[in-house]
Image: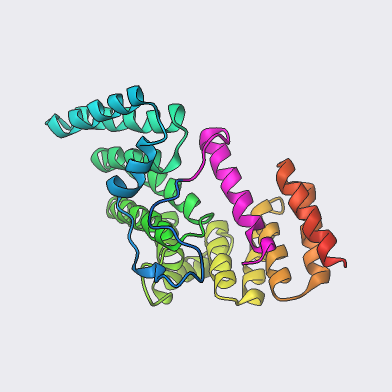
């Protein structure tokens, strides 16, 4: 994949990490990871939390910290009171977020706590963590792991509140971007229904735009992102995606226009540098 195709993914990841970790975390590269074109069937690979993610995370911390984690894990197994289990899961989540700075175990344990709490607020918050990382992840097996976790949480949230459009959109995004189904319409149709009913729903328009961009339907994607900007003119994500869509369809003039807009809007120095590099390349 060309370098410019990674620009927004990288920026999205930085933004996501900054929101929850102050930019201190790095994603875990699981043993299931391979590169594109390496001859492996990525769709068949599955990530196991304890075997892949937790094992690698434990290798990144001190023996004393690992001992503490094992003690907390054992207390979850022994605990027979739901409130006690919730408390321990939150302790584990806080450790991986604040002390270790690793996203995946933080999101996992936060999700385990939310399942026991079973409130719409906690379930949707936990799901959004997985979804935000999903949008910035290139590894197919990790995409599926993130989407599968988000799907379980959102399905539970929709049982509590079936009318929550954001949960419907998030669930659709799991199918579109998480390799959960061979039929992309399974994810697109519920989101399209929300967008038709409420064209000003930024979340629906954004996800449909991303789906169009992923499938190479760049004109349709741009139309969706423009709908986002109509409601929210300062939405930097939409501006980036319009720039990339024009770039990938070979429209250098419009790509430069929107990359320039993005450069003015973003506050991440590294992103500004990469955007300027791409603009310079397009002007050659």
- Which residue is located at x 55 percent, y 38 percent? 19
* Count of marks, rendered view: 0
Which one is in front, 214 or 55? 55
- Which residue is located at x 76 percent, y 47 percent? 272
Magenta run includes residue 3: yes
Q: In which quarter of the image is residue 79?
A: top left
Magenta run includes residue 192: no
Asked if residue 168 can be seen in this view, the reply is no
Asked if residue 178 can be seen in this view, the reply is yes
Which one is in front, 114 or 17? 17
Q: Is 136 above or below relative to 111?
A: below
- Which residue is located at x 62 percent, y 71 percent? 221
Residue 151 position, x and y percent, is 34, 57
Q: Left or right? Give the position of 280 relative to 7.
A: right
Residue 188 position, x and y percent, is 45, 71
Q: Is 46 above or below relative to 15?
A: below
User: Colour scheme used in the picture?
Assistant: rainbow
Which one is in front, 73 or 107? 73
Residue 194 position, x and y percent, is 47, 65
Residue 139 position, x and y percent, is 47, 59
Q: Is 13 above or below relative to 215?
A: above
Q: Farthest top residue?
A: 64
Q: Is the magenta stretch mostly helix, strand or loop?
A: helix
Q: What stretch is highlighted in magenta?
A: 1-27
- Which residue is located at x 36 percent, y 56 percent? 145
Which one is in front, 141 or 62? 62
The quarter of the picture where the C terminus appears is: bottom right
Q: Farthest right residue?
A: 284
Q: In which quarter of the image is residue 61?
A: top left
The quarter of the picture where the N terminus appears is: bottom right
């Amino acid at each position: 994949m060309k370098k410019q195709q990674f620009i927004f993914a990288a920026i999205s990841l930085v933004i996501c990490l900054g929101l929850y970790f102050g930019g201190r975390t790095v994603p875990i590269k699981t043993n299931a990871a391979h590169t594109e074109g390496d001859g492996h069937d990525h769709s068949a690979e599955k990530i196991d939390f304890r075997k892949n993610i937790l094992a690698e995370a434990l290798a990144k911390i001190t023996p004393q910290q690992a001992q503490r984690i094992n003690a907390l894990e054992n207390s979850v197994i022994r605990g027979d009171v739901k409130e006690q289990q919730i408390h321990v899961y939150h302790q584990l989540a806080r450790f991986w977020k604040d002390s270790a700075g690793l996203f995946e175990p933080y999101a996992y344990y936060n999700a385990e706590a939310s399942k026991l709490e079973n409130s719409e607020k906690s379930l949707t918050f936990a799901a959004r963590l997985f979804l935000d990382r999903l949008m910035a992840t290139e590894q197919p097996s990790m995409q599926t792991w993130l989407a599968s976790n988000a799907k379980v949480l959102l399905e539970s949230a929709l049982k509590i509140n079936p009318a929550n459009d954001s949960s419907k959109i998030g669930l659709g995004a799991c199918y579109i971007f998480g390799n959960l189904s061979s039929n992309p319409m399974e994810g697109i149709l519920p989101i399209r229904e929300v967008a038709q009913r409420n064209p000003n729903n930024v979340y629906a328009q954004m996800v449909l735009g991303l789906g169009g961009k992923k499938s190479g339907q760049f004109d349709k994607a741009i139309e969706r992102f423009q709908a986002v900007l109509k409601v929210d003119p300062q939405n930097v994500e939409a501006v980036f995606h319009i720039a990339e869509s024009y770039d990938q369809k070979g429209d250098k003039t419009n790509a430069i226009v929107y990359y320039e807009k993005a450069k003015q809007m973003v506050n991440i120095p590294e992103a500004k540098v990469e955007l300027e590099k791409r603009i310079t390349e397009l002007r050659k």
